[in-house]
Image: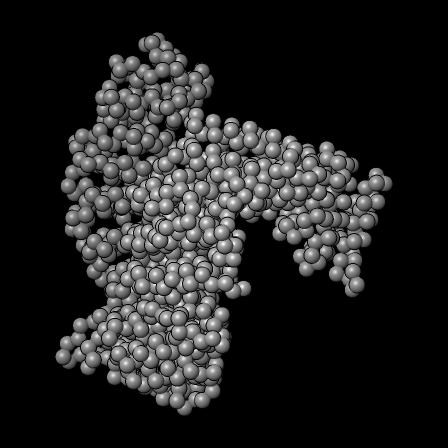
Amino acid sequence: MCLPAGLEAAPPAECTWLPQCLVRCWHAGSLSRCCAGKGVWQCLTDGLEVSLVHSLYLLSPGVKDGSWTVLQLVEALGSCLENTDPRTRGRGIQLLSQVLLQCYSLLQEKEVLHLVLFYENRLQDHHLVIPSVLQGLRALSMCEVLSPGLAVSVLKAIFQEVHVQSLLQLDRHTVYSIITNFMGTREEELKGLGADFTFGFIQVMDGEKDPRNLLVAFQIVRDLIAKNYALGPFVEELFEVTSCYFPIDFTPPPNDPHGIQREDLILSLRAVLSSTPQFAEFLLPLLIEKMDSDLQSAKLDSLQTLTACCAIYGQKELQEFLPSLWSSLRREVFQTASEKVEAECLAALHALSACLSRSVLSSDTEDLLDSFLSSILQDCRHHLCEPDMKLVWPSAKLLQAAAGASLRSYHCVTRSVLPLLLEQYTKHPQSSQRRTILEMLLGFLELQQKWGYVEEDESSLLSLQAQVCSVVFSALTDPSVQLQLVGIRALTVLGSLQGFLSPSDLELVVDHLIRLALHEEDSQTWGHPSTPLRCVSSSEPEEESSRDHCSLRQRCLQALAAVSIHTSIVRETVPVLLQHLRKVQKGNTAGNTQDMVSVCQSLHRVALQCQQDAEGCWYYHQTVVPCLLALAVQAAMQESAHPLLGKALLEEEVLAAMVPIISAATTHLSPELAAQSVSHVVPLFLDGEVSFLPQNSFPCSFKPFEDGECLEAQRRLVALLMAFVCSLPRDVAIPQQERLLQELLALSCSCNCPFTATTAAKCFAGLVNKHPAGQQLDEILQLAVNRMEPGLAEGPRRMQALTLLLWVTKALVLRYHPLSSRLTDKLLGLLGDVELGPTAADGFSLLMAESPDVLHKGCHADVRIMFRQRFFTDNVPKLVQGFHRAGPDVKANYLKGLSHVLNHLPKPVLVTELPTVITHYSHLCLQPLLLEAPQIMSLHVDTLVTKFLSLTSSPAMAVRIAALRCAHALTSLPTTVLLPYKARVIRALAKPLDDKKRLVRKEAVAARGEWFLLGSPGR
């Protein structure tokens, strides 16, 4: 604790005279020099008043260390406490209370007793003294040595002597704190007061308005009820003193330091009102009244409170009010235009039905659930017969809300509603009407999923099994696609109801699904995400007909992928897909490439669906990855001997489609299984070890990293190596990693094939990104720099060197490696190169964007948070400076690079940073950037317009001119984006028309003229 101004050190322990001396001086208003005569440090200079904080600082340590007792302090304060001036008495009690608040835990039982009696007596004192007395009682209420009976005595004194609501907010809060403390530690004593305690608290709380105090008061009421304090005849009074705040109408002031929100008060009051059934007879009429209010907030609060009350109410509390509650709920759902109100009404109806379902009935008691549901059916059922009318859906929602409350309510409603809907489906021949009816039927079918299988004699749905299936099957054959979609959703639900569909029904289901999946022309039907193709275990693509085999084959592949959601199914479908891939590879037709891509897309979908199941993921990996590698190796070896065989599999499009398969099959492997797999794959590429591949009798060796034109096809397969090693978890060790990195580096710089060079560079970058920091990484990076720099300087492979530079830079930027800034500077320098400049500019997009196959979090890359913001901060000034110095033939490269950086910067960050860019660089590059990259800049038009207009008043003439030129250039953005700002800009540009500088006025005239013409015909 810092010493107050003027104080030096703590008093010595032997200064037992200090209380008397200090109090005398404090009372007199200045510190006597008698203290100095006894060796006391000079606390304050002569003539200054000793403040309470100084006194407290001096006295509290002495009480804490036992130098003097609290009773000695009271004795020393005697002249203050007995003074005829109430202000002086108040200051004395305030000092004592503040000491007690710091030292209450050290008090003895006898001391507490005397202090309580003293403070109780002072509650009858002048009103100026009362706040300090309450602070002292708060300190005493926290004492563990409080004698039995004193808590009751204190509260009685407060209830009788203090008019709480006449006090200030802080003092009222002190009273609530005293009550809270006693309720926490002296519960049994307070309960001995019976209903008098409740009545006393009601008097304390009555009229409270401050939200800080209300939160505490509401908590006290909740405790009164939850801990079974006696309410006696004061139930209604306790309800009235709290319900007068319902509904809460509170708006926190701006910059409120207390942070109390309206929602805090709403939830706290709701917890009170819904805490006991004893409030029901008073609360339910209030809720019904507020539900009829014109204020939406009052409606919502009432409905949410009713829902909360239903959790503790029973039939007894609800019986009298059920008709009125249902009437209000029905009216709101039928008439409201608010989705929120409708949703809360349905939730309240659900809660009411659930409450009535829970009640235990005696033999002579009316079943209120039946009568309540009968009222709902009576008011809603007939609307279901009018599928074209506006009340059909509100009625269906009400019935479904009630039916979903319990199994009993579900049976009661569906016994009446399901036969009616099935009848209406038959009566209405129009597809639109049938669709509405089937959607309502679907809603009730989905509710059945909550209860699962039920006994046949209880289920109204099972008794209607044949009719339901007939209706759903008829929807699947209807010409209307929209009706078919609803039928498919209904079929999905029926398939999930265990035991509902008979074996013959299942055969029909399979027939319909195959027909829809393989022969239906509309893609909405066969490709609908809710289609229950997942219920089918296998399909036979070999049975396709020749007349539409291309489209049919794709649908078969999609169907096989769609159903592969369980390991048992995956074990059946994956071999079929791989067999089809082998079959396509052996073919020699023009469509082979697209067929292979389709198979790969289906395999990729299956891989994604297997990732969350460890068993399925490992089966897929060890089945698919070796097979794909074997097919690719075989195709690469065949190409040199038989160029027409297997050529399609080596196409860039096919290899690119195989990459995500291998990546998805690898990313979710456990480290142990991944290590097992990598021990096979890496030796395959480095040493030609093919023993783990199926059908591994190849005509020649596999040596993708050796030189020779005949090995070009083998080198293309580095893409598959990239997919594998760059998707491994970071903690998996890669065998011969240094050798692999060197081979990849050499291939990326020396290969003439752009596809191979790029994949090798990406693979190298992916491994570098995950490589542990240290000497080995530094040596590899230095080797890469030594290979890149000569390649970039001159020669036929400058583009390959640039590609390697881009990917290595990205790998290092993502992990904040120190070398990244050096490589970025190298890239910035290439923007001025006539040959490589445009590609280098596009490279900024690669650096900032998410890469789909490597260097992203999904493949365990080392990606630091906010790397884009850091790159922006470090390099945008360099881009602007380079633009300013560049020649006219390469300026566009800098603009393109800047546009890519801005385009990929997160929007919240860009909103924060763009004003800085505008302020510092608008005169350099923003005007050309608006002309060169309008699509990007239009995303930030609000920030641009605001900043440009503010800069037109800058003291610097050059800035005013640049801002006006930028405002002029804004008109190159899409007209629809600018029109909302037209009037504002024209008004703002009127001021610079009178600028004292002619050049400024000239730019203002040009800019304002363009904005006037904005949106004109023919412009």
Q: Count the marks.
A: 0
Point out residue 772 in the picture as x, y percentages from the top left corner. 41, 32
Please say if 528 is above or below 805: below
Left/right placement of residue 117 relative to residue 724 reads: left
Please say if 168 is above or below 53: below
Residue 222 lies in what quarter of the image? bottom left
Point out residue 761 in the picture as x, y percentages from the top left corner. 52, 40
The residue that appears at 22% across and 29% down in the rendered structure is: 106
Q: Quadrant of the C terminus?
A: bottom right
Is residue 281 visible in the rendered structure shown here? no
Viewer-proximal residue among 108 and 668: 668
Please say if 62 is above or below 560: above
Q: Quadrant of the N terminus?
A: top left
Point out residue 70 in the picture as x, y percentages from the top left corner. 24, 26
Residue 770 lies in what quarter of the image? top left
Viewer-proximal residue among 534 and 969: 534
Residue 41 lies in what quarter of the image? top left
Left/right placement of residue 246 relative to residue 374 reads: right
The residue that appears at 50% across and 41% down in the rendered structure is: 760
Point out residue 254 in the picture as x, y percentages from the top left corner. 51, 47
Please say if 400 is above or below 873: below
The residue that appears at 59% across and 30% down in the rendered structure is: 789
Left/right placement of residue 970 relative to residue 735 reads: right
Viewer-proximal residue among 733 and 483: 733
Left/right placement of residue 765 relative to residue 447 reads: right
The residue furthest right is 998
Is residue 932 visible in the rendered structure shown here? yes
Q: How is the image coloured?
A: one colour
Viewer-proximal residue among 373 and 152: 373
The residue furthest bottom is 427
The residue that appears at 34% across and 85% down in the rendered structure is: 470
